[in-house]
Amino acid sequence: MSIGLDRPRGLEHEGITSDRIHWNLAPAALYEEAVRRQEGLIAAAGPLSCRTGTHTGRSPNDKFVVRESPSDREIEWGKTNRPMEPAQFDVLHAELLRSLNGKDLFVQDVYAGADPAYRLPVRIITEYAWHSLFCRNLFIDDPQAASEAAPQFTVIDTPSFKADPKRHGVNSDVVIAVSFAKKLVLIGGTSYAGEMKKSIFSILNYILPLQGVLSMHCSANVGSSGDVALFFGLSGTGKTTLSSDPDRMLVGDDEHGWSDRGVFNFEGGCYAKTIRLSAEAEPQIFATTRRFGTVLENVVVDPATRELHLDDDRYTENTRAAYPISFIDNAVASGQAGHPRHVVMLTADAFGVLPPIARLTPEGAMYHFLSGYTAKVAGTEKGVTEPKATFSTCFGAPFLPLAPGRYARMLGEKIARHDARVWLLNTGWTGGPYGVGKRMKIGYTRAMIRAALSGALDAAAYERDPIFNLDVPVSCPSVPPEVLKPRETWASRAEYDLQASKLAKMFVDNFQTFEHGVSAEVLAAGPNA
């Protein structure tokens, strides 16, 4: 049987001969299938609530790239891009396909990339109905166009399939394997839907730079005057929250390209963290958790009333809502905008010593982009139970198939060409490290963003932070002056100096990887350790 938007052929091209295929089902039908299969339940006010089981975040140690021509000459092989031999991938592929025999499968034909010049048609085949709805929400859904375009990449997602380290050359029973030659992604052993989203992001991070387009792990919004702002940062640092501003139009919340024509969203939806989500601080995102069509991951739901408990982290800190970007009233329908006027690099400093906002020179921008300092937020990756200091190159190292310097050079060239201002914004801790200090108030963070984007900080006086070598404003509208100087928020100045020096040394030690590939000016823009 074929249900939904019929295709001229089946899945024979993908090696699948099942006649139990559900093509491009709409949300209501996917709700029915998910509930009938007991994949989830309908929570109060309408969202579909699902659990991902053991894996409540990405499994970065289980991600592999097939070593094959011609991509093997471009890939930056190592811990991030682990090689899989073609023969192992072929065995994995054949066994995964056999595991699908006799099963209902759900297909979505969608796009990644809002700019028609760079859009990537993608076919996503899933074992779960709710995964199909997740992909329909997160990617660009254009049924008519999708029915006419042949997919350029296919994702097959089957959580029930367990990989075998001996036969498949993997690390566990979980596998995420990408073949650029076969234009195929295989995902098995995990129900975490984010693996599908990030696999396509990794593919775009390979394809687009080779076409002269900078692919970026960032959110983007645009003001009434057409001023575009980018927000770089890892999960949990504030990309989604800070870009969802009622006074600015949202371009996208997580993944973008920057071409010679401007920026464009890779996705058609948002994937927002919901743990301790506040209707007062984040009204737009909060509202999406109360409507039909949103997919909730690992959110605690009252079994009797179906009411949501967004403050409850019993399953994970990494609770999520996946919804179409059209659920945000002031979203840019086209997913496209002009060239950025501001670039904001977000960090959640677990040491509590970085200033909440600092102005970066072009050289400082390159230094901090290559450093990518932040804290892994609890639950975003398996095994991370509390914030942990980390350096993630280009604020997205797990998703970069190419050498980091390639992305950094492209960003530097575009910042210079379009004269963009660059800011370092700390959304992490103040008054002490994690466990002692407090997370920066979101009201202060929003005030600093407004001041930077409006030009209010252009005329401010600045002081140089002697340890981190950063230009810090001495005043900012709606922010107490002492908040701008983290040393003054600590009970012990000596303890602050100790922790700050410790973090500065971590920066310097980490940057040794890049010091021979950058200019002396970029190297000098880092902390003094």
Image: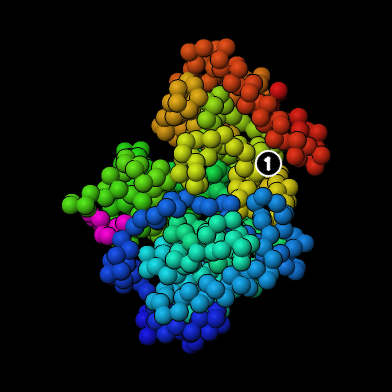
- Nearer-the-camera pick, 379 or 370: 379
Q: Residue at x 39, y 55 (%)?
A: 53
Q: Quadrant of residue 181?
A: bottom right
In the rendered image, the quadrant that contains the C terminus is: top right
Residue 300 visible, this orientation: yes
Q: Residue at x 45, y 83 (%)?
A: 18
The amino acid sitting under disc 1 is Leu
Check disc 1 and report its element: helix, strand or loop: helix
Percent x, y of residue 153: 58, 71
Q: Quadrant of residue 6?
A: bottom left
Q: Residue at x 48, y 17 (%)?
A: 489
Q: Residue at x 56, y 63 (%)?
A: 164
Percent x, y of residue 365: 67, 38
- Nearer-the-camera pick, 262 or 35: 35
Q: On the rendered structure, is 26 left or right of 333?
A: left
Percent x, y of residue 425: 54, 34
Give the farthest residue toward the bottom. Answer: 8
Q: Quadrant of residue 85?
A: bottom right
**Which contiguous range is marked in magenta?**
41-49
Tell me if residue 37 is in the magenta stretch: no
Mark 1, residues whose alpha carbon is within 10 Å: few (<14), some, or many (≥20)? many
Tell me if residue 43 is in the magenta stretch: yes
Percent x, y of residue 438: 43, 26
Q: On the rendered structure, is 223 left or right of 263?
A: left
Q: Is residue 33 above or below residue 395?
A: below
- Nearer-the-camera pick, 324 or 44: 44
Give the farthest residue toward the left. Answer: 304
> Can you identify the residue that label 1 sits on?
370
